[in-house]
Structures are given as structure tokens and as C-alpha cells.
Image: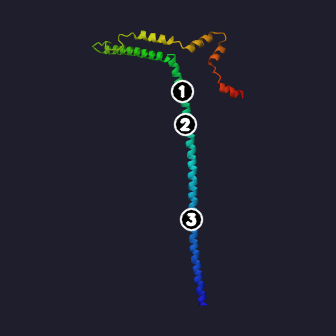
Amino acid sequence: MEEANLARKRTEESARKDLQAKDVALAKVNQRLVGAEVREDAEGARAAKAEEDYQRVLAQHTTSSVQLEDEKALNADLDTDRQWMHDYEVDDAVVVLRAKVHDGGYKAAYTECLTHVNAMSKKKFTDEQCRAREIDTKGELKAASDAYNTLIVPILAQVEEYLAADDYVDRLRELFEPEADAEWETESEV
């Protein structure tokens, strides 16, 4: 009987050790499972953050694209305006007018400066070294202004002509309405 008790105790001890080993193994598995869930949650959070960042960058790119298209349209308009001014020699007239204004201002400022310096100095200075000394800057400015003011731009002459007519509204509409696009007409007819 003692042997049976001893065998039973050994069996119980062995079963207890097996149970403890299984509890330790189960705890490790649970620990790994919790770790995996934490990693999965972190991955989900990282994925959500990445998606959020992607959407933000996409929105910025879309905004940038719209701004870029607006800038391209503006530059195209500026190029068209610049070409129009060049075609009707408005840009040349403006350049000449600005140069004459600059020369006139330069000569007037030089003369005014001489007046102030000569008032305080015993030595009298002259305008001999002024680059515009012998130039009639006022006359040249008047001539450039007259040339600019009498510049004829064909479309403006046509507008003035149409404004003098009795049916000026119809004529101006005819002048400024965009030409119908054949492709647009066929789409609207369908």
C-alpha cells in the first residue's frame, strides 16, 4: 500500500509538474497573442496614419495642380497680352515714353541738385557734366507723349467707329462675341 501511495504521489507530482509546464506554456502563448494583438493594433494605427498622410498629400497635390493650372492660364493670358501690345507697337511706345520721362526726371533732378549745392558753396558748379545737358528733354517728352497718345490700335479705332453708329450695341456684340466652335455646335444640336 505504501508503494501504491508512493506511486500515486509520484503520479500526482508528475501531473502537477506537467500542469505547471502547460500553464507556463499557456501563459507564454497568451503573452505572444497579446503581443501580436498589440502589434496588429500598432500596424492598424500605422496604416491609418499612412492613409491619412496619403489623403493629405493627395489633397495638397490636387490644390497644387489647380494652382498650377491657374498660373499657366494667367501666364498664357500675359503672353497673349504681351504679344498683342507688341503687334500694335504699344510696347515700343511705352518704352520710349518711359525713357523720355526718365531723362527728363534725370535732368530736372540734376538741375535742382546744382541749385542747392550752388546756394551753399562758394564755388559755382555747372551742368557741363550732365549727360542730358544739351538735350531738350521737355520737348522729347512731349513728342513721346504725343506719339503714345496718337497711337492707333486698329481694334480701338473700330470700337470708336462702332460707338458712333446708331446700332452700336449690335455692332459691338458682333465684334466681341466669340466665334462659335463647330464641335460645340454639334454637341449642343445632339
Q: Nearer the viewer, residue 59 or 158?
A: 158
Give the residue pinned by disc 3: 31
Instruction: Estimate how packed mark 1 is, as few (under 14), some (14 to 19) or many (20 or more) residues with alpha carbons within 10 Å.
Output: few
- Find residue 76 and name its label: 1
Q: Position of residue 35 (x, y in %)?
A: 56, 61
Q: Secondary structure at mark 3?
A: helix
Q: Position of residue 73 (x, y in %)?
A: 55, 29
Q: Secondary structure at mark 2?
A: helix
| Left or right: 109, with 58 as reference point | left
Instruction: Estimate how packed mark 3 is, as few (under 14), some (14 to 19) or many (20 or more) residues with alpha carbons within 10 Å.
Output: few
The quadrant the C terminus occupies is: top right
| Contact (Cβ within 8 Å) of mark 3 with mark 2 | no
> In the rendered structure, which amino acid carries the disc numbered 1?
Ala
Vertical position of residue 168 compared to residue 14: above or below: above
| Left or right: 176, with 89 as reference point | right
Q: At 38% from the left edge and 16% from the top edge, which residue is drawn?
A: 106
Give the CA distance from mark 3 to mark 2.
48 Å
> In the rendered structure, which amino acid carries the disc numbered 3?
Gln
